[in-house]
Amino acid sequence: MSLVYVYAIARAGSTAPARLRGLDDAAVRTVADGDLVAFVSDVAERDYAEEPLNAHIADMEWLTPRAVRHQEVNAALAAVCDPLVPLSFGTVFRDAAGVTRMLGERAAELGPRFEALRGKAEWIAVVRRDRARALAAVESESEPLRALRSEIQAAPPGRGYLLARQLDETKRTALRAADAAAIVDATEAFERAQMRLFREPLVEDAGGGMLARFSVLARRDDGASLDGMSAAYGKRWDARGYALELSGPWPAYRFSTVELA
Amino acid sequence: MTSRLAALPDEELSVLDLADRLLNRGVVITGEATISVAGVDLIYLGLNVILAATESIAQLEARKK
């Protein structure tokens, strides 16, 4: 038995590149309804029904090549379809009729989505901090910190200990303020360029000095401007230990799901 | 900056970025609903499974380094 796996949705009349192959090398074809078309391929029920799929997805050796193929299909589609609403990995229907019903039910909602995504792609933007360099910068810039240091050097041991604790707290506060300013500066740069932003949730202590992550919706040909923004950010912030890193362009996976309001 | 729109060359592939784009917060069409294949016809990948997968990817990448 086979199921129907959906990669993306586009306007009716959109076609996939010839001989495009999807998951497990199955041919990518279209299922149409009204003004919409879904790009799909057949997948085996034994692997893609809910239970086996949920088991497989925790298996990196199984998942990785398939996630890569899912992305390759959407990259190929994005190259020829504009606008394109790419779907997340694991959107599976029992049959083509299910896909048709979904297209019918979602047609009204997808209209504005298409307009928002026309000519667009998304980037992942990460504000990263080198803690040691950021602390050094904070220490050299902060007058209260410099004053505390001088006071500690001149103080007797007991008072010196208390002042050292006060120094640590003052440093943490200054670093938090610098972090906040670095994030706001990145946000404002994207907003000035009229790019839509989505702040990604970040787990506590994300590691790698990651302070904030955004998805950025920009014109597909905005890669050079974004590189320029990252470089300009570096000029403002590199000396203070902060960097703005970008990955993209990606098909608009995130902006296919987030609220558009 | 590497392009993920035109191509995804293996040597430049960041598995974590890929997982982040593809496995995040469920599918477009259903939002957060969990619908089994047997029930209606759409599969939603449970968030706990997604988190486990992302964590495994992070570990996989860490081991590579």
Image: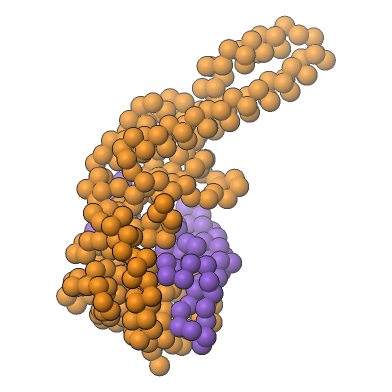
> What colour denotes chain B?
purple
Residue that appears at 33% across and 52% down: A122
Horizontal side of residue A109 vs A153, given as left or right: left
Horizontal side of residue A20 vs B48, given as left or right: left
Q: How is the image coloured?
A: by chain
* Image position, residue A48 (x, y; %): 45, 82
Please state the total of marks drawn on the protein image.
0
Q: Which chain does orange denote in the image? A: A
* Residue extending farthest right: A158
* Image position, residue A163 (x, y; %): 74, 17
Answer with the quarter of the image where residue A108 lies.
bottom left
Horizontal side of residue A146 vs A107, given as left or right: right
The one of A34 and B9 positioned closer to us in this rendering:
A34
Compared with A97, A12 (above or below) is above
Residue that appears at 31% across and 37% down: A193
Compared with A211, B5 (above or below) is below
The one of A239 and B43 positioned closer to us in this rendering:
B43
Residue that appears at 37% across and 38% down: A191
